[in-house]
Image (spheres, rainbow, N blue to C red):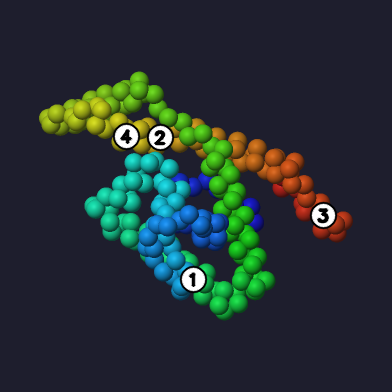
Amino acid sequence: MRKVTQSAPALIFAPALIFGLGCNKSAQDASPVVANVGGQKLTQKEFEDVVRSFYPDKAAADALLHSDKMRGERNQMLKAIAEQKAILELARLEGLDQDPKVRIAVDSALANAYGSAILEKRSAQPSPTETELRKLYDEVVARQKAAGVTQDPPPFETVKSTLAQMWAQSPEQQQLQKQNNDRLKTEFFKELKEKVPVTYAEDYQPSQVGGN
């Protein structure tokens, strides 16, 4: 059942987030209602909190939330959240929240969502230095010239964010990130054993796999 992975922000919403949406609604939340799901109001503040949790980069989150050019993407994201809340409400109405089989599946999804969140919280994403970005910029410009591109390259400052993405996706950085993720997972399960020890009845001792 072990399936703790690390994932980047995307339009795939973690069960832990959606299940908790609205549970901690502040009495001070007087923001406009952006959707009504079976009588449950989803406010603009709640929606913005979800967006910002999946887009840690403030500029990207602001663009999705406020740019007219991204209105379609924003509305699709809201639709996805509303539909998931609707599914949860329908399941409740049909009593599935009390179904043992469903509860097991929910607990499993929550455990993986929480595990991924813990790993992401503890993972320090490396950032390229100005020197590394400049070197990458020069390499890209040199490759373009070698390929016969005569158009002047864009100024370095205007493409720094794109260069940072290229740097992070390089084979070297991907390998380092994989090693870091493997280390974090090992430390995670070690800490889990120490902070939340589990014991088993004699006839139910699990076999040791991979030292875990």
Neighbourhood count class around disc 3 (C-alpha, 10 Å): few under 14, some 14–19, many 20 upward = few
Gap in angstroms between the C-alphas marked 2 and 4: 11 Å
Q: What is the x, y in percent for residue 211?
A: 72, 42
| Among the two numbered marks 2 and 1 on one chain, the one whose residue lies closer to the N terminus | 1
Circle 4 sits on which residue? 161
Real-space CA distance between mark 4 and mark 3, rounded to the nearest whole angstrom: 51 Å
Residue 146, given in percent of the width and then of the height, sits at 19, 27
Mark 2–mark 1 contact, CB under 8 Å?
no
Label 2: which residue? 168
Label 1 crowd (10 A; few <14 / some 14-19 / many >=20)? few
> Looking at the rendering, which quadrant does residue 107 occupy?
bottom right
**SS class of the residue under badge 3?**
loop
Can you identify the residue that label 3 sits on? 200
Report the Cα–Cα distance between label 3 and label 1: 36 Å
Q: Which residue is mark 1?
A: 87
Amino acid type shown at disc 3? Tyr
Determine which quarter of the picture holds residue 16.
bottom right
Q: Are marks 4 and 3 in contact (CB under 8 Å)?
A: no
